[in-house]
Image: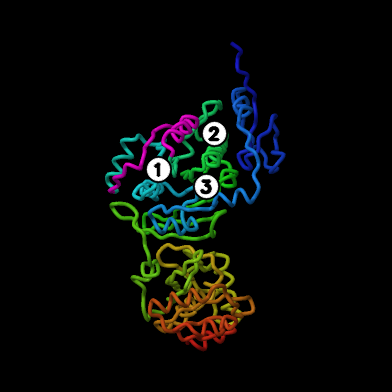
Amino acid sequence: MAKIKSKIHYLCSDCGDEFPKWHGQCPSCKEWGTLSEFKVTGKRSSLRSKALIQNSRSLTEVLAGNPGERFNTGMSEVDRVLGGGLLSGSLILLGGNPGVGKSTLALQLGNGDLKILYVTAEESEDQVAIRAKRLGIQSDQLHLSGENEIHAIESHISTVNPQLVVVDSIQTIYNEELDSIAGSISQIRECGQQLLSISKQKNVAILIIGHVTKEGTIAGPKMLEHMVDTVLYLEGDDRHDHRILRSVKNRFGPTHEVGIFQMEPDGLSEVSNPSELFLAERSENIPGTSIFPSLEGTRPILVEVQALVSNANYGTPQRNVNGFDYKRLSMLLAVLEKRMKTPMGSKDVFVNLVGGLRVDDPAADLSILCSVASSSRDQSIPDGMIIIGEVGLAGEIRSVGQIDKRLQEASALGFTHAIIPNGNYNEKTKKIKITLHPAKTVQNVFGIIF
């Protein structure tokens, strides 16, 4: 019997490219010391040579098969983030910090009508069954498998023929043809490619759960995020009960869409009105607080912005911010000092977006600036008012996108006044049942509030 030959290849941990010989510097991404060695057996290439070659089809033939048909997962918040439901043949990557609820969310999809194969490579089938019992999941459509070898998983998929496959997690799946341990760069890259091939050939949706690094990015080669169709992150921490499911990449739907969940003893429950959640304990008639209508994907969410300004006890004043970009806060403080003659050089400034929500929307500029000015002047912003607008370096208020959705959400929650950019004041916004105060500059805004 002929001995299977193995070849030494080198894989870049940054870009994921493979090379037949070692380089000190990666020829692709130009990074130094990123190549790692792994062995490729001859069996691997022989299997690829036997792969079936599919004939091409015309666009008319493809459209005749009604592509793009989606099916519901049983959780409306998940369907929202996915762009209207789960698409057959799609490959989805779900990441998040340890203990945030990734496995819980994936297991709760078994509460619906989907036929699911749950590949529990990190736990035994009994352990997953105990969690399913705690979550109240009782379904004959949910199949469990403790397999973690990629070819055996493919055999299970062919036997069960599910609508959705959950792989928990990609770091514990391995290919026996590679001479490296599970979780290595080469194993993650190869197993991810195999799962992509399975999802397209069998037209089955596959949800891959991935570990994250200490920087918060998904562990493994970056190409893993490039090869999948959708990348989701489940955000949250132990200090808050709510969890945010956010899409950062979606080939079949909007990006930066969010779904809000509440962590409870029996699992994750959906939050249909997140604005009420974030404003449940809001402060009223207290200097330094304002309300900003954020837009996460297509969903408007009202957030309370808090600011505290005090005299600095040391030579260098503190600038602390939670939920907003630190450098942008520094820019807003410079505008406040230069354009409004409000001294900030000797003041400590603390800014917090209540509820742990992180906002990168420039439309939050004006609300944060007004909260800082309100705390500095010790004058409260009128109750029932929302503030929205992007602030330029000249102190001008620039228009923002999709302001009608933001105003309608605020009106539905009982807010009666809104300060908006003058560029957004038009016939469409005038029809919304809320009193509008258009402003061109920060000076105009301060004249209205103070």
Question: Which residue is denoted by mark 3 in the rendering?
Answer: 90
Mark 1 Cα-neighbour bin, 10 Å: few <14, some 14–19, many ≥20: many
Check disc 3 and give the amino acid type: Ser
* Mark closest to the chain's N terminus, 3 or 2: 3
- Residue 426, x across and y down, in percent: 57, 84
Q: Secondary structure at mark 2?
A: helix
Q: Are discs 1 and 3 less than 8 Å apart at CB?
A: no
Residue 10 sits above or below residue 365 on the image: above
Residue 311 lies, with reference to residue 243, above or below; the image says below
The reply to whether residue 138 is visible in this rendering is yes
Q: Which mark is residue 312?
A: none
Residue 290 counted in the magenta span? no
> Which portion, as a residue range, is magenta?
136-161
Q: Foreground: 72 or 240?
A: 72
Q: Nearer the viewer, residue 281 or 4?
A: 4
Residue 245 appears at what percent x and percent y?
45, 56
Residue occupying the far bottom of the picture: 447
Label 3: how many Cα within 10 Å (few below 14, some 14–19, many 20+) = many
Q: Secondary structure at mark 3?
A: loop
Q: What residue would you read off at disc 2?
A: 187
Residue type at mark 1? Answer: Ile
Q: Which residue is mark 1?
A: 116
Q: Gap in Å between the C-alphas at discs 3 and 2?
A: 21 Å
Residue 163 appears in which quarter of the rendering?
Answer: top left
Per the image, label 1 sits on a secondary structure element best described as strand
Residue, x 48% and y 38% (percent of image)?
Answer: 171
Q: What colour scheme governs how the chains and residues are painted in the rendered image of this protein?
A: rainbow
Number of marks in picture: 3
Give whichever of discs 1 and 2 has the lower sequence position. Answer: 1
| 394 relative to 112, above or below | below
Measure the C-alpha gap from mark 1 to mark 2.
24 Å
